[in-house]
Image: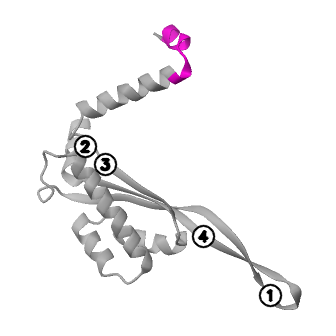
Amino acid sequence: METTDRKLKKSVRVRLKKEELKKFKQANKGRLGAVTASLRNVPTSPRKMRLVADMIRGERVNLALNILKFDDKHASRTMEKILLTGIADWQALNEDVNLEDSDLFVKEVFVDGGKMLKRLRPAPQGRAHRIRKRSNHITISIADANEDNKNVEIND
């Protein structure tokens, strides 16, 4: 089969691989593990966003939403939106499972540095100080605690 793959154009091989992946996802719908949601180029410093990410890492989804809703940090609003997006993505993949019955938790959250806008600010005696306006990329993964336990039992 490898010889036939080599004869095909790269674009055709990529298309076939995507079709196989799509069929696999449809066959395993509802049995997928964690769902990942991401947001790129958020105009907040990664250091400030990591403080918020550390608060909800490993928490149940309901508790994490409450923490973010009543926290007064500006980054909490953005994190709450991406968490709601992750929950909606999980529900779209698991239509047959009731959201209230599932035991969703925040499996992992990580914040990476994004683009940095560099500006100059005038300083005394003709000098200039550089100002770095940082941004970040957020990735959040949501999973069902019950599903993770089933996977562990099957693998053991």
Q: Quadrant of residue 122?
A: bottom right
Label 2 sits on what residue type?
A: Val
Screen quadrant of the C terminus: top left
Region of the chain picked out in magenta, as a range: 2-11
Label 1 residue SS: loop
Label 2 residue SS: helix
Query: With 144 as the anchor, is 41 left or right in this view?
Result: right
Q: CA distance from mark 1 to mark 2?
A: 60 Å
Whichever of labels 1 and 2 marks the residue nearer the N terminus, that label is 1
Q: Which residue is mark 1?
A: 123
Whichever of labels 4 and 2 marks the residue nearer the N terminus, that label is 4
Q: CA distance from mark 4 to mark 3?
A: 29 Å
- In the rendering, which numbered label is found on residue 152? 2
Q: Which residue is mark 4?
A: 134
Does 63 appear above or below 3?
below
Query: With 39 as the anchor, is 30 left or right in this view?
Result: left
Q: Please say if the residues under marks 3 and 2 sit with CB atoms less than 8 Å apart.
A: no
Q: Which residue is mark 3?
A: 34
Q: Identify the residue at horizontal 13%, vertical 45% (top origin).
A: 96
Q: Is residue 91 visible?
A: yes
